[in-house]
Amino acid sequence: MTDQPADGQRPSNLFYLASLRRPLVDRADGIYIWDQTGRRFIDGSSGAMVVNIGHGNRTVIEAMKRQMDRVTFAYRLHFENEPAEELARQLAAHMPEGLDRMFFVSGGSEAVESCIKLARQWAVATNQPQRWKVVTRFPSYHGGTIGSLSVTGDDALVESFRPLLRAMPTVPAPVTWRDRDNFSPEERGVRYADMLEERILEEGPETVLAFIMEPIGGAATAALVAPDSYYSRIREICDRFGVLLIHDEVMSGAGRSGRFLGGDHWDCLPDIVAMSKGIGSGYAPLGAMAASSRLVQPLLDAGGFQHGHTYAGNPLACAAGLAVLGEMDRLHLIDNAAAMGDALMGELLELRKRFPFIADVRGKGLLIGAEMVADPETLAPIEPGKKAYQRLLDHAYARGLIIYARRVKGGLDGDNFIVAPPMVVTREQVDEIVSILGDSLEALARDLDLPVNG
């Protein structure tokens, strides 16, 4: 049985997240995508926060063509290849000091699994086999494979697979904006970080291997940012108990936040970093793990990294990644992400005044999220059955704007949306995005009888 066609499309034998049919894509350029009828969409979410340098970049495409004329595949155990070697060198130069060893994969879930397996093998190689627990945050999102789901704090995604998973300990994500107390933001940041210490002590410090966190939240928390005090305190706690700190930069990395890594905004040097999405920018499946020689060398000395993927270090994907990095520098896209992110944040804060059901706006650079509630005073969520986030997505899509939205609070309730256009976006395009988003929020407010000012 095939999914039924829409708008004259043929039945499809493909299936993905849902049976919803979308128009057939034709071409894309910059922040725009056209379907086969000629209708134009603004890619206000860079796909799934992937296409950092924009669509249709000719420099990247030409670099890939040149590589295709030479070799498209060489298995890592048979040959080294220059694109992979050079990309590793250039990524190391963009990393925080000491993170000088790279391992390439095809996507974010693979990158997270690689981080977990590296951490575990390092513990075994250094005579700490009792360390195996990876503390994670709830809510959080770290991938869709069985291993990465075990450290994903999202009930909607995890529930069906719990019998297959090794449950890992969790601590609350630092959703300090919801707290109603007399603490300052910085005091709240320390309090949330101290929950990690409490959990490590509860589990037994000798059993805790690592703590994994998104420096800037992704799909599960809509660009959540903690108070500055949180980050340095987390590093201090990990150091005190010998726990490795893993930063999941799959969404926040590769310049999107206005720094190369989201974690670069704070004094919180990670031990291991997972990256994907923006380093390939949608031109080829590409992800990476970055770690220090301090972690890598002991397991290499013990016989090697017991992990690998067929497309690890693929020359075509790495050629694309090299060209993407080059375009980020040539076009000063990280600086533009910071500047346009400030402009977008200012405009979204104005929308919050107009639509009081937007309870919080947060993020860094061009990774900005907002959370919607039924009651701005009590922060009660919109009734899940009203499907507020899906309605907003549909209203924006009908107006030619693509944004990202889903539920937070474990994926079960709490509606959010993310605005994350490609890093080539201009000020005029930011204004166009915000104008369409405002019209879409007006329509949502009418649908659900939500309050509007002015």
Image (tube, rainbow, N blue to C red):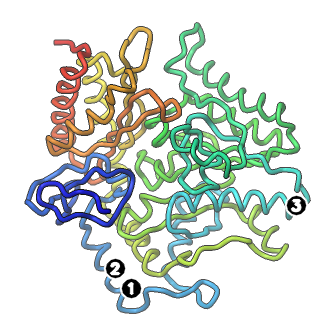
Name the residue located 33 percent from the left edge and 22 percent from the top edge.
358
Vertical placement of residue 14 versus 219, above or below: below
Q: Does residue 343 show up? A: no
Q: Which amino acid does label 3 sit on?
A: Thr
State the residue position of label 2.
Answer: 63
> For this view, does 425 lie left or right of residue 149?
left
Which residue, as the protein is rendered here, is positioned at the far left? 38
- In front here: 388 or 27? 388
State the residue position of label 3.
Answer: 126
SS under mark 2: helix
Label 1, residues with CA under 10 Å away: few <14, some 14-19, many ≥20: some
The disc placed on residue 3 is: none
The image position of residue 29, as x and y in percent, is 20, 62
Q: What residue type is labelled 2?
A: Ala
The image position of residue 103, as x and y in percent, is 61, 69
State the residue position of label 1.
Answer: 67
Label 3, residues with CA under 10 Å away: few <14, some 14-19, many ≥20: few
The image position of residue 409, as x and y in percent, is 51, 29
Q: In the rendered structure, are the residues bearing label 1 and label 2 in contact, judged by CB atoms less than 8 Å apart? A: yes
Q: In which quarter of the image is residue 268?
A: top right
Name the residue located 35 percent from the left edge and 43 percent from the top edge.
366
Vertical placement of residue 358 versus 110, above or below: above
Q: In which quarter of the image is residue 420?
A: top left
Q: In which quarter of the image is residue 324?
A: bottom left
